[in-house]
Amino acid sequence: MMPPEEESPDGDRDSGLVLLHGPKSGSTRKGCDPFAQTQRSKLQHRRARINQQINKEMRMRAGAENLFRATSNHKVKETVALELSYVNSNLQLLKEELEELNSSVDVYQNDSESISVPMIPLGLKETKELDLLVPLKDFISEHYGEEGVLFEKEIKEFMELRQAMRTPSRNEAGLELLMEYYNQLYFLDSRFFPPTKTLGVFFHWYDSLTGVPSHQRALAFEKGSVLFNLGALHTQIGARQDRASLPGLNQAIDAFQKAAGAFNYLKENFSNAPSLDMSAASLTMLVRLMVAQVQECVFEKMTLLRAQNDFLTRLQLAQEAARVEDVYSLVHQTMSQPHVKDYVPFSWITMVQVKSEHFKALSHYFAAIALCDCPAPSDAELLEQERAFLQFHVTMPEGPSLRVLLQDPEERRKLGKAHLKKAIMKHEEAMRIHGLCKILRKMDILQEVLSFAHKRSLSKYSEIDHEEDFFETGEAPDIHPKTHQKPEIKSPNFSQVKVTDLFHRLGPLSVFSAKNKWYPARRVHLMRGENGFGFTLRGDSPVLIAGVIPGGCAAEAGLKEGDYIISVNGKDCKWSKHAEVVQLLKSTGKEGVDIGVITLQGSECPKAVDRKAAVMSSGSGMLKSNKENSRKSLMNSKSASTLLVWSKKSKRSKKSTYSGVPFTAVGDNEAMY
């Protein structure tokens, strides 16, 4: 993962995500659509309302349970028990209503008239509003020694960004909005979340599928929930594509692969989530579901690209369909596990099982038409078809040798008939399972797809069935699954949305972060002596006093090795380059110069100061128990930039590098003033 690049205040702000700011009372951001009255947004609003009701009922239940345990009065206990049964009944009804919303997959599908099997998208996690104004102002005053009120604009801008990301639009701009907020959380973590203290605010999020509320003080929960919504939004974008066209299929494949990547990244880097939708078991199921949906799109892409009806093409389609059946069977097994079964909507489990049976039927159908509709091979084609057919079945079919089978039309018809018989059985099983789910029965398009495929197989069977067939149709062996395009799990590319730290005025993160502590800023008046000021400077942003000559002007004024220059004559120098600070010092006259400095606690020794980049090694600031806190897991990004915010260290070190020699003998890379 790549954290956002830290830039100076004068950096290029236009390179990041463009924000459209309106009046303060009703600002609008690109990628945010809070008032859209689409079917999807109405569904999300209903989900939010049900979440609030579930939260209310759960608070009432907790209170009733506490009273039940505390009281010894039998009459009160009876009353409370009655109230508890009423609350539990309400909760069950609300959860059933939410399950029905989560099963409304047809709302997220495209509006095309073409018939496609519906995909399963996820609804977004809902969150409560969060007021950070007072906690952040207090932290700025206490930790950074700055007036908190001077940073109200930045705090409000961050809160507006959080409000906007709650309602992302279902397009690339909405994805960028979530990415932008996630990247800003990196800076918020570094600035305001020290490892030994909490900010005192709770992050509230509702479970995507059950609506059960959870809250934590850890910023990791906020980051994980945003990542979950990034994956969920990808699923919605994938589901809405018109899969009757090649561009639509490619976009759907890309969206589902990115959704799988987001859920997989969440599973690997965030642990101990308080909500079930972010548990390892649920995320494993979601990754497998997205991979299966990618595989389904690959099969549909094959049917578009391979329009020719030759023998080998139909064998490939049969194996692609068998591969889709294979991955959906794995998803169904995962959904049927004890900890997942009671959590996932029944309609999802049923649809996955229906798809597994449906694609198994299709694999046998394409095998049958390859055998029955294609002519026997010529001598030139025979060897190639033999090779393909040798790897086609899981077990070789009973009967004559492979060469005889391929060249004898009657033998081909018999095996084709066996495949069609199995196809019809699987179509009927898919339709039976479909009929067991009340929600799926309402989904006309799925019923239409299953019915069409079943009738097509029946029609083909009638066509090749002869009245004089006295032999009993054999058992067709299963088809070996194979795909020409393996799904790719695409991890989120956080560096694609560049952001500037909203709180950059606090100073460079290498020094001015929540993890560092420093002594109160000192103001030192310095006069220039015959040999200059008597110190050496090194580095940029902020410039470090690398050495102080004993007995010199700087030493007498109270400057120490390891001090950072934060101002010169009242001008803020936290972000100033080496040359800029030197120029300010050189421009002073006989009256001297006022220098503002700070000293990091525990870093008074120059060698300790020289390791200042190490404070950023924890990456995006997870809980200690979380893997994302380790530098190793964060360094997996393929990007050319390094993970650390201070990736520009090498450029700085060319100007000066502390060599450990006495300051009376200045090294080549240090400058004495």
Image: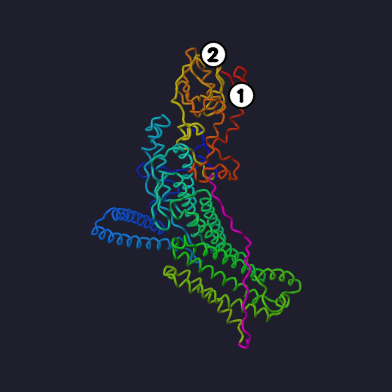
Would residue 160 be found to the left or right of residue 252 on screen?
left
Task: Kindly state the secondary structure of the residue where label 1 is placed.
Answer: loop
Q: Depth check: give the residue in front, 628 or 42.
A: 628
Give the class, few, some or many, for how many residues have Cα within 10 Å of label 1's Cα (few <14, many ≥20): few
Q: Depth check: give the residue in front, 226 or 74.
A: 74
Query: Looking at the picture, how far across and down is residue 30, in whole percent?
Result: 45, 47
Q: Depth check: give the residue in front, 518 or 114.
A: 518
Residue where numbered disc 1 is placed: 660
Identify the residue at the far top of this view.
530
Amino acid identity at mark 2: Gly
Quadrant of the drawing holding the N terminus: top right
Query: Looking at the picture, how far across and down is residue 117, in whole percent?
Result: 51, 66
Residue name at image x 50 percent, y 16 percent: 588
Task: Kindly state the secondary structure of the residue where label 2 is placed.
Answer: loop
Q: Is residue 17 visible to the viewer in this orientation of the structure? A: no
Range shown magenta = 467-494
The numbered dot on residue 551 is 2
Amino acid identity at mark 1: Gly
Instruction: Give how far apart the Cα atoms at labels 2 and 1 are.
Output: 19 Å
Q: How is the image coloured?
A: rainbow
